[in-house]
Amino acid sequence: MDKRTDKKFVDPVVDQKIIKQKKGKGIWWLLLAIVIIILAIWFSTQRNNNDAAPAPSSSSSAMSQPAQQPAATDDSTPAAAPAADSDTALTALQQYYAGEGNDDSQWIDLDQVSFATGNATPSITDEQSLNQVASLISQHPDHSIVVRGFTDSTGNEAINQPLSGQRANAIKNWLTQHGVDGSKITIDGQGADHAVANNDTAQGRDQNRRVAIQVKAAQ
């Protein structure tokens, strides 16, 4: 008996088909694995891009929000007093002595001087300018000076009338200490009369606590 008849006989053609089928199945699994890897990489990339997306900047947020309206102001709060032009009195005196429309009835506010409520002690806001006023007056001894004091409406007439005179006298003393002949100066107190500003506001009352001078040519 031939020994080859004991072995299982496989047709070579069939054997080649089986090998090809196995190889084909292996290729499909390999392709599927590659597709899965590619998809995993793609999803990972998309997630990283989302995580790395910058947050909206504060400026962009501010632009997207409606503009805030300014806070409403309280009209009852007095506005800050404007800075006084301390050269006004000096300029007016220079024009008077130069004969430019010199009117003996003209009153010149000494805007270099201010007073606290109920106080006759002057606060000199521009001493250099007031010194120039005193120097200019002293250079014209042929003229006399009237110093008139005023108050705001705080208090009654019994208080304001003498207080205005005390303020005028304080400026007279200051002028005499700075070279003006005291015999050429007279004082006058007007109390709360002749207000130049609204006494209903702190700013107006501050402007009404004042002293003015009048220059008179020698008769």
Image: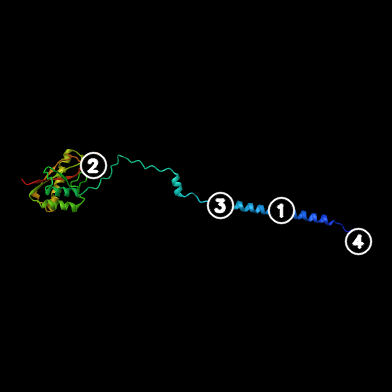
Specify the quadrant that holds the C terminus: top left
Q: Earlier in the sequence, mark 3 or mark 4?
A: 4
Give how far apart the Cα atoms at labels 3 and 4 are. 71 Å
Tell me residue 212's x, y (percent): 16, 45
Please tell me whether residue 69 is drawn above or below residue 1 in the rendered image. above
Mark 3 surroundings: few (<14), some (14-19) or many (≥20) residues within 10 A: few
Q: Which residue is mark 2?
A: 204
Q: How is the image coloured?
A: rainbow
Amino acid identity at mark 3 = Asn
Q: Identity of the amino acid at label 2? A: Gly
Mark 3 or 1, nearer chain start:
1
Q: CA distance from mark 1 to mark 4?
A: 41 Å
**Residue 121 coordinates in the image, percent (x, y):** 18, 48
**Where is residue 200, by image quadrant?**
top left
138 left or right, relative to 59: left
The residue beneath circle 1 is 29
Q: Amino acid at mark 1?
A: Trp
Within 10 angstroms of label 4, few (less than 14), some, or many (20 or more) residues?
few
Question: Which residue is disc 3 drawn over?
Answer: 49
